[in-house]
Amino acid sequence: MKAPWVSIESFPLHLGEEVVVKGWLANKRSSGKVAFLIVRDGTGFAQATGAVGEFFTRSELKEMAKVPLQSSIILQGVVRKDDRAPGGYELALSHFQVVAEAEDYPIQNKEHSVEFLLENRHLWLRSQKPHAVLRIRNQVIMGLHQFLQENGFTLIDPPILTPAACEGTTTLFELDYFDLGKAYLSQSGQLYMEAAASAFGKVYCLAPTFRAEKSKTRRHLTEFWMLEPEAAFFDWQDNMELQEQLVSFVVGRILDSCQEELATLERDLTPLTKIKTPFPRISYEQAIEILKAKGFSAEWGDDFGGDEETAISEEFDRPVFIHHYPAQIKAFYMQPDPDDTRLVLNDDLIAPEGYGEIIGGSQRIHDYQLLKNKLEENNLPLEAFQWYLDLRKFGTCPHSGFGLGIERMVAWISGIHHIREAIPFPRQIYRIYP
Amino acid sequence: MKAPWVSIESFPLHLGEEVVVKGWLANKRSSGKVAFLIVRDGTGFAQATGAVGEFFTRSELKEMAKVPLQSSIILQGVVRKDDRAPGGYELALSHFQVVAEAEDYPIQNKEHSVEFLLENRHLWLRSQKPHAVLRIRNQVIMGLHQFLQENGFTLIDPPILTPAACEGTTTLFELDYFDLGKAYLSQSGQLYMEAAASAFGKVYCLAPTFRAEKSKTRRHLTEFWMLEPEAAFFDWQDNMELQEQLVSFVVGRILDSCQEELATLERDLTPLTKIKTPFPRISYEQAIEILKAKGFSAEWGDDFGGDEETAISEEFDRPVFIHHYPAQIKAFYMQPDPDDTRLVLNDDLIAPEGYGEIIGGSQRIHDYQLLKNKLEENNLPLEAFQWYLDLRKFGTCPHSGFGLGIERMVAWISGIHHIREAIPFPRQIYRIYP
């Protein structure tokens, strides 16, 4: 076939042209004289129509109608506008070639259990909804890069193999590292980003992180991707401004660039169009009051679970910052509030619609002695953290940063229930295949 | 200080304006009446000049001259053009504030051992050369994303925790995974990209990969980042075209956007300006001939080491493809050459100037039975690879892809000798700190 190979996504640019499409047969029906094929090529789904006449005999059309679903095919034809066709365009076929016939495809057009679908994730990716979610994920990640790069942040990849834990020691994956003893899979790149912020000013990483947590909730994975910006000379309020700008930028980008994917997912767009700065800010204490008023038995010092986060988020039409948590329920490195050292200068950003925490951020302790005390209080090995303490010896400054969970962000924007569907190959405590 | 906080990088946009800079004291000298400070803020280095007069008394200037190097400082002043100043601009100081004085800084303006510098990598990042290399790394990575996104590739993150080895089983990091037995750190995302290519057409990942290799060469790390594009319906020649376009695009972007960094590294730009498509292509057999003519004892079936790669690359002024290697020295998944099944449809891309292999790519086996045979020949567990075999059952098609080593690419473009300096926090068999 001699016509140019184009993507289905680009059909609007090729109206009236003869083009080649390479893809897979996603669906089909036939009226005897006309075969309607739905072809997918990874960029979209399109209808291709073959008719008895100039290009196909009746028996060729019969053969075409027999080709099994998911077979790889190459088509040639003219791109035509057709409002009745899915996507609004169709390909009027002149050539049809089967590259390889598929065997009986395990995923049928019926209800399958999620377990079955996850076991077949390598195939399930081809279905319309997973495909749409991961196209949104691609745009979310590129949007995060774009915003941070345009705002002077440098991407600094963190190490994954680390000599010590960053948050808690009970949820670490450990492995043998040659003659150096144990190494641990990173739970966060933050500490390394703090070092990099003293060298590059504003930095971020976007990397896999690991938690050997036995949680089975819809918000947990053992392996997930996290965006972690860190900025020197940023205080906790600068930090929140950065977060709301970043989140609203990315949501805006998805509304612009992923209309088809959002439609496939039947995502209600109304809540997303409301995601504009500034986001509301409430203190931890105010959050406790909201919960009490709603009948929760919340007391000062409690951490919030999914239900509490959902109840709070229902009070607002956009993400809400909760700041000034009690130090006792937060990580050792957070800067105490100078006005009330029981509290820290942190924030959690809670997504609307019950999607829970998508960001956790804070100003970091920049005083050497205070940080050393905190490490000791938390029984963390000073030796492994010496380099981290060093940062407070040589030109320390107030600095802040945050971690944004990619899968939680994607699940929220896509409107899907469980974050395992927001990552291509999810890892859970009972799943490491495929 | 009330003036706007700006980056040193943006000085050309603020000529004649009063601005604030927040950063660290990188160097200083004083003539008694004038203090010349070199300040760095992560985006660049600039000279700031304080003079006895309107803004500073003689004793204030004396104090200023005593501030230790690497102290965090906030400056205010007017941006002026000064061709004698490093970078071409200087800040005429009106305010000077020390945020935190640094203790005696371990990295002095003298020769340190690389071991010492790597042990202090968290501080060494602040020095001009490491800073320049990692700014180039940032631009390389963003250039790779940009090219691939503009060419219709979707970013699909691969899993890091995997149930089986992709290449060789002797160099795997293994760990306990709950009740599921052993898990292994990914050596490559390729197999997963092949699954994704059947769903998205053209995909790529950019993720950390791990090899528990005991190699101590300047081209090896135990943890490194790899770009792995994969495209359905691409044959081995399409694959090479994609590679040369990608590499020449990124080199062009670096020449445009990192002039200052390349100058800091004293990188000879002449070889980089020659990196234009098409790149030369030679067969493995031709490569053997070149080596023999240069006095190497190379025989058909030998793999090439660093010396051989350098000798071959010296014959060309741009990266060179070597294709059609013997199957016996390449990975199990490579498509045999239909004209000579002793060979595979692969390519290695060898960088100029002795930087060795930066890309390894191939067309993949798309036939079910052939792939199954290869897995068995290589004693790989069929069960763990069932999902990978599945891809050949349900709409298989010719497809190709490659792996590009980020650190090798950055080392080459930056002109640095050892790839450990091309990653922020290198991991080697004897190094996991900081």
Image (cartoon, coloured by chain):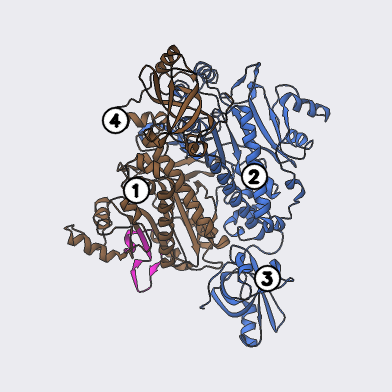
Chain colours: A brown, B blue
Q: Are marks 2 and 4 on the same chain?
A: no
Instruction: Give the alpha-carbon distance from disc 3 to disc 4, as whole Å.
Output: 65 Å
* Residues tagged 3 and 1 counted as in contact (Cβ below 8 A): no
Marker disc for residue B249: 2
Q: Is residue A231 among the parts visible in the rendering?
A: yes
Same subunit, tags 3 and 1: no
Above/below status of B283 relative to A277 = above
- Measured in 3D between alpha carbons, the distance from the residue under mark 1 to the one under mark 2, in whole angstroms, is 35 Å
According to the image, label 3 marks what residue?
A: B89
Magenta-drawn segment: A325-348
Tell me the mark number nearer the camera, choosing from 2 and 3.
2
Residue at far top of view:
A59
Within 10 Å of the Cα at label 2, are there few (<14), some (14-19), or many (20+) other Cα atoms?
A: some
For the residue marked with disc 2, what is the amino acid?
A: Phe
Amino acid type, callout 4: Ser
Residue picked out by circle 1: A412
Are dots 2 and 3 on a single chain? yes
Q: In the structure shown, which secondary structural element does the residue marked by tag 3 occupy?
A: strand
Which chain does tag 4 point to?
Answer: A
Q: Is residue A299 visible?
A: no
Residue A113 bears which disc, if any? 4
